[in-house]
Amino acid sequence: MSSMSMEELLEAVRAFDGVHELAPAEGDGTPETVWGDHFFYYAPDGTVPARAQPYATIVTKDQPGDALSDLGPDGRWRVNIHVGRARYTELTGEDPGSGSAARDFSAADVVLPHPVYGTLGWVAVVNPGERTGAAVVALLREAHEDARRRAARRAGGVP
């Protein structure tokens, strides 16, 4: 795989059992700053959970306070995945609580700490491709399953 399109990644995530995707767009009452982005939850009933954050997002533009990925040029986007502290350390070689080492957060096709939420166990990949595409899909599946287990615990079910 030389590069992965956003649509290919969206198709992979949409196939997960119980996924709920929010995709803000013009005219739906959401702020323009999130139009074109995607937010993923484990929500088999199709309702965004009241006490849960998304387990992954795809962002298509820089935001105030989050511009290090250089998402301004056409065709640049970033997938963000909550992987938890242990997996974060495995993937980045850093403790999420220590903050991120100096690095180029705009590098494409590289698993990096999230430029803003890395300390919370989030990783990010700008334009996944040959080096990271399969790993990104696997990490998204893991994050989805983690969200499913959390939802089961909140509901009093078995993890």
Image (cartoon, rainbow, N blue to C red):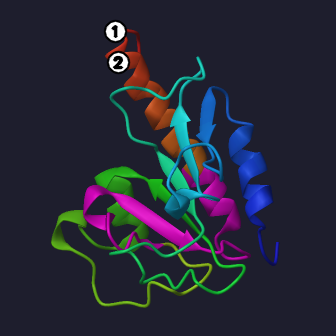
Query: Percent position (x, y) of residue 122?
Result: 38, 59
Give the residue number, with chain letter if any, for mark 2.
153
Q: What residue appears at the point 56 percent right and 80 percent down from the top-left corner?
A: 71
Q: What residue appears at the point 64 percent right and 70 percent down from the top-left corner?
A: 132
Q: Is residue 146 above or below residue 12?
A: above
Q: Is residue 159 above or below residue 126?
A: above
- Looking at the image, the residue that sits furthest to the top is 156
* Residue 59 visible in rendering: yes
The magenta segment: 112-139
Label 1 sits on a secondary structure element that is loop
Q: Are marks 2 and 1 in contact (CB under 8 Å)?
A: yes
Query: Percent position (x, y) of residue 28?
Result: 61, 43
Q: Does the magenta segment cover residue 50? A: no
Q: What residue appears at the point 52 percent right and 85 percent down from the top-left corner?
A: 70
- Tell me the number on the disc at residue 97: none
Q: As rendered, which of 38 and 98 lies closer to the eye?
A: 38
